[in-house]
Amino acid sequence: MWLATQHGFYYIICKSAREFHILGRCREDLENLLLLTGKNLPIHDHPLEDFRYHITSSRETFVEIMARLALALDYPRFTGLHSNPAGERNRMESFHRICTLLEKIQEQADANPNPETPGRGSGFR
């Protein structure tokens, strides 16, 4: 799962029924997440991996982190944000580009509502 928030961008995977990995491209994103949630989890550095920084958590801790992110949601529209709390305009510009790319996928799906069309009903599950 990808999760773009005002605190950072996260890639989340379920390694097993009890273990979740929260990955980030920027260490600061994971530091922001830990600060927001009050969790004291180590951030592992894997310089040769696609997402360099990793946090490992139990299912229970992951659910608590997700709940805290939901409670911290305080904006009406993500694309209306101009910067994250650290004032990093480049990050928000990247998020806006992602939104634009996803909008194009929606437009293509709307133009061809066939459920067998690649990108619609196939791919990520």
Image (cartoon, rainbow, N blue to C red):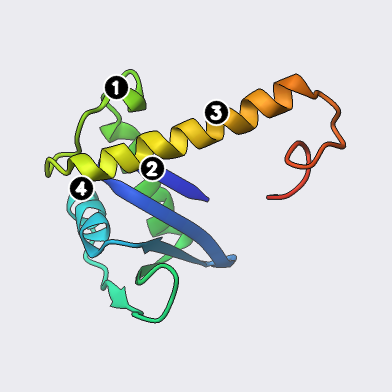
The residue tagged 4 is 36
In this rendering, the label closer to the viewer, 2 or 3 = 3
**Which numbered marker is on residue 80?**
1
Q: Give the distance between the C-alpha atoms of the residues marked 4 and 3, in whole angstroms.
A: 30 Å
- Which residue is painted at 73% across and 41% down in the image? 119
- Hey, which quadrant is residue 110 in on the image? top right
Helix, strand or loop at disc 1? helix
Q: Which residue is mark 3?
A: 103
Which amino acid, by three-letter code, is at mark 4? Answer: Leu
Decide which of 56, 47 is in the foreground and name it. 47
Q: Residues within 10 Å of mark 4 (few under 14, many from 20)?
A: some
From this view, report whether residue 34 is shown above or below residue 54.
Answer: above
- The disc labelled 3 sits on which kind of residue? Glu
The residue where tag 2 is placed is 4
Dot placed on the residue nearer the N-terminal end, 3 or 1: 1
Q: Nearer the viewer, mark 1 or mark 4?
A: 1
- Residue 18 at x, y percent in the picture: 53, 67
Label 4 near label 1: C-beta < 8 Å? no
Quarter of the image where one finds residue 48: bottom left
Between the residue at mark 2 and the residue at mark 1, the CA separation in whole angstroms equals 13 Å
